[in-house]
Image: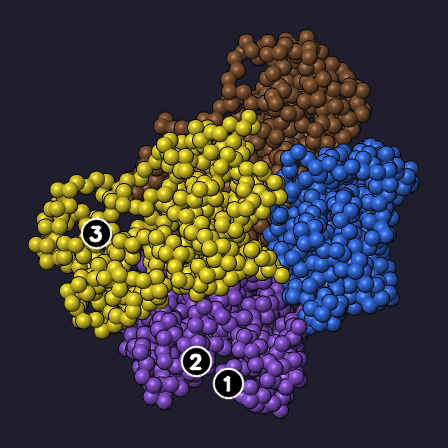
Chain colours: A brown, B blue, C purple, D yellow
């Protein structure tokens, strides 16, 4: 039973101006314990160490994704497009709002360190013994499962999945605009209103009217720039590397039976990879930062140093190299070890293919990753077939290797490294 | 010895576009442990619970205040005004950058609860055994003391104090612009460039050229609006009240010898009001939020409830009353107690005069609180003497009482309250 | 018969992002000869001589007023407020779009010089033998008359008049935002979305929900600032004075039978104040500027000089005096004449009461000029009764006299003016 | 003798916030008759018929180009780069301010119709018997010639030419930002501050520090988008075509001895292509629009119709065709003629190569058209060698043919056209 609020509620939002809540269910979801936790998870992880404005949370972003989805659906409803299944409104809105619910603190790094997956956690929270699940069940016993399957991209109505997760979805539009706003970079400006106006539900998916092609081109160019200017910024990468090393080191110590002076729940469970949903929900960036603050005083010097590096933003430096083979990497590690450096902790190599690659790449096999244009003859065409600029961008690949290392430490033993290796790290 | 950086460094800032660092000292100060801590203290305390965008930190704001000060001084230097003492540049820049260094987590609430003062702590950090102090001493043994005295407003060159702390200072200009940007409200837009162009060093203080009067009027109106729309927003006040109650309750328990399941350093010291500088620097919002998360499981039910209220944003409701005398307050407290409510924790009364009042109020006795205009005949005149609008605003006073209370709890015992009192709380 | 367009048309607008046209009638009106003429009439008359960005036309503004009205009505329709008469939609939209149709070139000055009134002309065009009238008649023979009566403020449904013309109407909201955008001043930023959300049709007029009070306060403060910073800017006033003098001089010459080297239609008709609607529609700023260009070569030196002053922006200087009585004015005029200056053309006195006064002034007698708030008990209250800031502003009155004069000319004969009078004009 | 103004003057500008004038010469140039004329020439010609906000003038743009140049030079001076010839400051500023001085009304169309060149006219005005020339001569008899040679790109110091005219010059940066601002499109946002910070005078030209590469990429992508979204917009092209036809028809009539009812100076001179500088300066868009207004009543029906089309925005429709050979064109023209249409006036074919092509295309032969990056080893490298995205864009070519025609007229004779030709024009 979908109840409307007596009076619409709004949130003032710097990106979308106002976020409008008309449904009681949405209002209740926002007010759950689990959703409010997203206020303590930053949207861009460690990017605030590069762009100090990027302190916004996944809470803000989730509201934004919900709002864009709401606007798209309102428009579909107003136009009464026959291809839009009106009964899917609440599923789509809930999935949009909750899609990031399972993110942990400093998501990418913690997922990498503990082989977790935020999507799985989102589904566990949506389906588990949680306030969110209780609210969702008001719309039917199977409603949580519907929402979870949209998030897993297995929902039977592909058009709903499309809205929330596709190369031109509400998620991506919100984060481009929001991340650009909070970092202050100019690159994320897209003509969202125009894109929204051009979206059409069509044969079970969301497509774009052909006349919106240029707005989509601009969106893809913005995304391209945001990836290289913001998301893959080497300083941010450096801070993620430190984070991963902290997690790795702490786990090593834990596994070795180290007695931590500070290890509140649910950290032991995290290290053992045995977290219940309730425990997982205790994880947030406040806890992680507090642990780091306390760990600076642990007896293990390496852990203490790494925590200080992260908290005080004493990051690793990096050098860029065009190519790097396995043999050279081995040579470097050996030379580091011989010089008294730690072959793992004092060197991290970033292979471009490790990156969470999401720049638009049309894919002939899977139409889910395609952006389809609807021409005036009602024919669908994949955008890169008609747009030169999209074709140009989508083939691009900026593959350079980055070597991250603690500058002062490496510099101190420079004369103990072979000339050929030393020269890689200390370029003048 | 003031060294310039080989190459200017910049920070991308959404408010000022770029923040320029030209001096090695400034760069070193930013990179200290103590300054980086400001990343973990929000600029607007609990305002993010009202305006979700307001997640920006005092780190960003401090950079902004520094940048505005830098621009003002550059302009004074370029114009070669004889009344600007050029040798004060570094004192002014350092004081601008560091003026908020002593802020604790959720400043206003924690200061209120533990009778602390962030300005004192700023001075202790500037003068103590800290990285900041070490950097400052590079400019002379007495340099930290100079910076501290600017912050205390006792520095002999009043013009430097003026720059950093006066009704039209770099601090206020940055926070208006920055808080408006991050909350997304429209009210904070001021023509800062014009105001800066109109500032003049004159006879030992900063004054404004008469032709800048309208820009200053607009600035004062923006400030007026920001106070009532953002800073004094009742929802924010409500969350501050919960915060204060948490601190109060935890201290009561601590004083009563309660054994906390979670009480890492420096919380015991905080409760005993015996913190060293090093301990104080461990305080940040990550720690406070983590404590709240853990305290939800304390044996004391009240503390647990209050922490949940704060973390899950279940805030107190409020009613507004035009006037309220002591007798009525006593009556309400008694009635609450009789009905099984807690006379202190279940009711908080906000007297407008308790507010950190900072709306512009010219003061004939103290020229420090005045904005002086310099007319073409080189005469100084206090702005409210010539500006009708300033005169109008500065007399205004929006004194209403707000009663904050836990809605569900009070509603549950409503029939046990006298009609006259019940009707105050449950207005239809 | 109100037909919808097969597909909505949009105009890209820098202020409202997109202007949406859904009705065939609106589309047809925009494409009439008479509406397109508004592209050749600047929105802010001579303000572009003070703020070079202010080159926008009444065409843009009219689209903006239409768009705001459309948004308000859509919202009323979506909420299904019983007090909104749905059948009035097209009347309101057409009146909003066309309300400025009768503006002449440099409206204020030409109206003053030739005692015309743009509102009368708007009605004549709406009712006359014009393309606009033909389009309107598609909705009924009496439809043009309905639209005209909204513009004349005599339409029986006062709520429609209210939408288009009241202290908080679509017209004022658009011009504040638009004029601020194009001049580049910071003052015009209002939270229009919030104001729109707070508007309610109520008992035959448009009122504001009480919770929108602060947004309205901010709107009134913005308007106050825009008046003093932009609309009444002395440099703009100076250029208007020159314009009026040109018109006055040309008419004098015409009346005296001067044979103009350039006097195309409809200028003779204008001078004789005998213009048909068709002739009036030939008047635009291109024609007026072209006439000025040609008149620089007229045999009458004064006319030539005035035209050059205007075209080359050699404006009159001004001095500000606190008070001025009739006697002094007479003395000045006599002294000017005695010194060989022209007592009328070389001196213009701007009395503040001459100004097209539109700053908000609540008026107890006429509710049309009031902004009414609707409180939660469904009571209406005039805003200045509850808002201190509105009360403060609405009483304000910045009455200073400005004397405008040709600086070089007056300076040249300074020694022939009595000391007491010379000192007024040449202040050091 | 370069005199500074006693007090800096500023212009409020919506794009650069303030435009700062410090030199008496610049102030005097702005106040000349010839420079003020630019207020009557729109920056984007007929684009206001597509984007109604685009009503800004070349006056605004010229101030903007001056301001950017001023900022670049100030920065060079502050950094004391040895490769910047400080004595060239005034030449560069004057050339930047005056570079568009010779633009006629609706530049592109009028130049095309009468084989004129605005650069030639700029030089004639700078060197002629004009107020501008008189002001410039205050800096030396040969100073006007210096300024003219910068505009002609023949000045001996190539670095000065570079500043004002190169793929990354002050002109292009201003127009991108300004045209985006006034049209309201999102595409023109570039990080100008960053680009300016990265510019370096180096070996006689302006280059970009390598770390500015991404900002330059973004600038080139913005330019690419602005070309296709704004400058080459088919509706704008259509209006330019009508304009050209008006000019062509009027000249035909003039050459045939037609007696115009309205043909004020300097139109006869324009038709005869015999204009003096003084006559040329009488040409502005007010005059052209006034002529069109009057010509609607000329006895020549075609001229009247074309003028009405332009003034009332009844533009030609267009169809896009992938390829078109000469033979087909001939066939169409013959078929048109046979069907009673005018083979020239009722059909215009836009070949992409006719476009004023200015999208970035690096050119190995001419370094003037290159953007050079300066790497940390002080080596210069052309940007497309290191930037994938620039390489991709610069090869792009969107060559489609557009056929413009009067829709109603062609539709009326459709059955008299061969099926194969009719189908080109009336696509369903």
Which residue has dot 1 on it?
C342
Q: Do discs 1 and 3 belong to a common subunit?
A: no
Residue matched to label 3: D348
Q: Is residue D102 left or right of residue A33?
A: left
Q: Which chain is indicated by disc 2?
A: C
Q: Are marks 2 and 1 in contact (CB under 8 Å)?
A: yes
Which mark, by number, is residue C302? 2
Determine the CA span between mark 2 and mark 3: 48 Å
- Which residue is drawn at the image coordinates 39% and 47% (left, top)? D152
Determine whether A248 is above or below D310 in the image. above
- Secondary structure category for the residue under label 1: loop
- Asked if the residue at tag 3 contacts the one at tag 1, i.e. Cβ–Cβ closer than 8 Å, the answer is no
Is B318 left or right of D96, judged from the image as shown?
right
Whether labels 2 and 3 share one chain: no
Dot 1: chain letter: C
- Measured from the top left, where is residue A256 in percent x and y? 74, 14
């Amino acid at each position: 039973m979908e109840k409307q609020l007596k009076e619409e509620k709004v949130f003032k939002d710097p990106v979308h101006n106002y976020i409008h809540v008309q449904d009681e269910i949405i209002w209740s979801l926002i007010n759950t314990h689990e959703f409010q936790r997203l206020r303590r998870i930053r949207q861009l992880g460690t990017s605030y160490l590069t762009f100090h404005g990027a302190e916004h949370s996944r809470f803000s972003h989730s509201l934004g994704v919900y709002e864009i989805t709401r606007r798209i659906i309102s428009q579909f409803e107003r136009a009464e497009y026959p291809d839009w299944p009106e009964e899917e409104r609440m599923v789509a809105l809930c999935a949009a709002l909750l899609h990031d619910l399972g993110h942990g603190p400093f998501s990418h790094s913690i997922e990498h360190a503990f082989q977790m997956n935020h999507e799985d956690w989102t589904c566990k929270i949506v389906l588990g013994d949680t306030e969110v699940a209780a609210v969702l069940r008001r719309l039917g016993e199977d409603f949580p499962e519907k929402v979870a399957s949209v998030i897993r991209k297995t929902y039977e109505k592909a058009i709903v999945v499309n809205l929330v997760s596709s190369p031109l979805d509400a998620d991506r539009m919100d984060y481009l605009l929001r991340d650009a706003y909070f970092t202050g970079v100019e690159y994320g400006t897209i003509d969202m209103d125009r894109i929204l106006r051009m979206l059409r539900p069509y044969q079970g998916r969301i497509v774009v009217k052909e006349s919106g092609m240029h707005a989509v081109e601009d969106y893809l160019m913005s995304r391209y720039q945001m990836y290289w200017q913001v998301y893959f910024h080497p300083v941010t990468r450096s801070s993620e590397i430190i984070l991963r090393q902290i997690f790795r080191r702490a786990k090593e110590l834990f596994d070795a039976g180290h007695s931590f002076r500070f290890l509140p729940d649910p950290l032991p469970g995290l290290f053992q990879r045995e977290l219940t949903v309730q425990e997982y929900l205790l994880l947030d960036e406040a806890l992680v930062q507090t642990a780091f603050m306390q760990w600076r005083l642990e007896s293990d010097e390496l852990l203490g140093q790494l925590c200080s590096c992260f908290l005080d933003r004493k990051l690793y430096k990096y050098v860029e190299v065009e190519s790097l083979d396995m043999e050279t990497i081995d040579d470097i590690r050996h030379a580091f070890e011989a010089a008294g450096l730690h072959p793992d902790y004092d060197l991290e190599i970033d292979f471009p293919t490790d990156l969470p690659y999401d720049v638009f790449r049309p894919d002939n096999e899977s139409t889910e990753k395609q952006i389809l244009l609807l021409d005036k003859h009602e024919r669908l065409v994949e955008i890169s077939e008609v747009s030169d600029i999209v074709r140009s961008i989508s083939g691009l690949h900026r593959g350079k290797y980055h070597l991250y290392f603690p500058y002062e430490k490496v510099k101190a033993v420079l004369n103990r490294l072979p000339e050929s290796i030393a020269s890689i790290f200390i370029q003048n």
